[in-house]
Image (tube, rainbow, N blue to C red):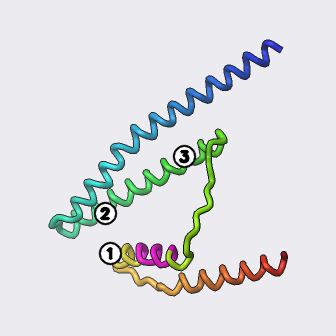
Amino acid sequence: MEQRRGEGRDEGTSRRKSDLLLMRMSHDIRTPMNAIVGLSHLCLQTELNSRQREYVEKIQDAAATLVALLNDVIDFSHVESGRMELRSTPFRMTDLLQKISKAVLLRAEKKDWKYCSAWPRMCLNTLREIHTAFTRCL
């Protein structure tokens, strides 16, 4: 019985240490990454030759990817520790898809890619079909 209590305390202590390490690591990594994202954004507002612009855009993309990865790791740790809280937030799907579409379009234009903006309408049709299927099941 005593051994089980000790194991429980050890596990709790270990979890707290792990959470503390994750919080410190998150802050220690996020702060310089946010500086890189911000400074590269400012750099892109200046006059650069095409080669320099390409390099800074790659820095910005890599930094944004690392920040997203760090956020995913933190979210996963919250899920594992049972601290993840889900909230229901109303939103309009059309607004969300249009916002995403605009962001993708800007990035595509920067890279001289062709972009078809019809996919938000296609997604909405798919969502309607899913809604109809669920409604039929109920």
Q: State the residue lying farthest toward the left.
A: 47
Q: Nearer the viewer, residue 136 or 113?
A: 136
Between the C-alphas of marks 3 and 1, the distance is 30 Å
Question: SS of the residue at dot 3?
Answer: helix
Quadrant of the image occupied by residue 137? bottom right
Residue placed under numbered mark 3 in the picture: 73
- The x and y percentages for residue 57 are 31, 63
Q: What residue type is disc 2 on?
A: Glu
Name the quarter where the C terminus is drawn.
bottom right
Q: Is residue 34 left or right of residue 47?
A: right
Between the C-alphas of marks 1 and 2, the distance is 10 Å
Highlighted magenta segment, given as a residue range: 96-104
Between the C-alphas of marks 3 and 2, the distance is 24 Å
Q: Nearer the viewer, residue 43 or 13?
A: 13
Looking at the image, residue 87 lies above or below residue 138:
above
Q: Is residue 44 left or right of residue 19?
A: left
Question: SS of the residue at dot 2?
Answer: helix
| Rendered image: mark on residue 110 | 1
Q: What residue type is disc 1 on?
A: Lys
Quadrant of the image occupied by residue 38? bottom left
Looking at the image, residue 121 lies above or below residue 88:
below
